[in-house]
Amino acid sequence: MRFLAFFLLCFSFCLPLAHALELRVALGVQDLVPNAAGKPGETGGLVAFNEDLAREICRRMNAHCRFSYGIFASILPDVEAHRADLGFGNFLRTPERERRVDFSDSIWRSSSRLLATAATARRYADHPEGEMTLDKLRGVRVAVIADTQQAIYLRSVAAEQQLSLVEAKTMADTLRLLRDGKADFSLLTMLSAFVMLSRETPGAFEFVGPAIAERDLGGTVHIALTKGNAALRPAVNRAIAAMRADGTWLRIVRRHFPFNLD
């Protein structure tokens, strides 16, 4: 009887554990053009940071992780449909998204900011009402990545502010729209834009106005997790907490950025 009880206990716990050792991780990229390593998107920056973070989380969970890469708009649907277990797309936690997926504890903080070519920024530098801000935009074309919080907010004020929205698939596409004169401004996640601009010709683009964290355009960023897996979220959160406690999280941040992300 004692052996049978041990066998049943092992059978109950070992199967979920074995399943948890295989995790599918979806990583959001800024562009779909293959880089030198043959992966979609750019090397380095936020994508490399997210990948290092994901690999360390997998290591601490003793999990074998398989990575896939896609644009921001594909990550949440993949996690929701259980095509991926973890999704890294710089997600802010919102009630609508929480109905679709679970979220980890915070991994960093985000804000949004307007971006324009240097010529457009100079043209709006002497705005009659002072520094150009998101509220003062009137009658301009704004490029935005589809299915982001930035797109949701701009759609809510487009009619009132007479804005023409130009939706794009990736951040790289929004820069092309600005460069080609098909949009006047873009509204982007500030850290992601900072990384993209580091690869552009210096002075080609400029941030316009202050960083914006209110109106759901900023806040804490989380990993998207599949619903229905009761063991996944606490395991991921334990890994994040341990990384912060022993300094690993900060070392990964400093490997990729010259500033803190909190």
Image (spheres, rainbow, N blue to C red):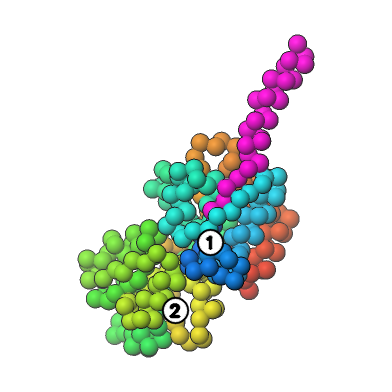
Q: Quadrant of the C terminus?
A: bottom right
Range shown magenta = 1-26
Magenta stretch contains residue 201: no
Q: Mark 1 or mark 2: name the one nearer the start of the chain.
A: 1
Residue at 67% over, 63% down: 252
Residue 34 location in percent, x, y? Answer: 53, 68
Q: Are marks 1 and 2 in contact (CB under 8 Å)?
A: no
Callout 1: SS: strand
44 sits to left or right of 115 = right
Q: Quadrant of the N terminus?
A: top right
Which of the two residues, 245 or 58, is positioned nearer the viewer here?
Answer: 58
Q: Amino acid at mark 2?
A: Phe
Residue at 77% over, 16% down: 3
In this rendering, does residue 30 appear at all? no
Label 1 packing within 10 angstroms: few (<14), some (14-19), many (20+)? some
Q: Which mark is residue 207?
A: 2
Q: How many marks?
A: 2
Which of the two residues, 45 or 31, is positioned nearer the viewer here?
Answer: 31
Q: Distance from label 1 to label 2 (Cα)? A: 19 Å
Residue 10 location in percent, x, y? Answer: 71, 25
Residue 204 location in percent, x, y? Answer: 45, 85
Label 2 packing within 10 angstroms: few (<14), some (14-19), many (20+)? many
Q: Which mark is residue 109?
A: 1
State the image quarter where residue 187 is shown: bottom left
Q: Amino acid at mark 1?
A: Arg
State the image quarter where residue 12 is shown: top right
Q: Is residue 179 above or below residue 47?
A: below
Residue at 57% over, 47% down: 24
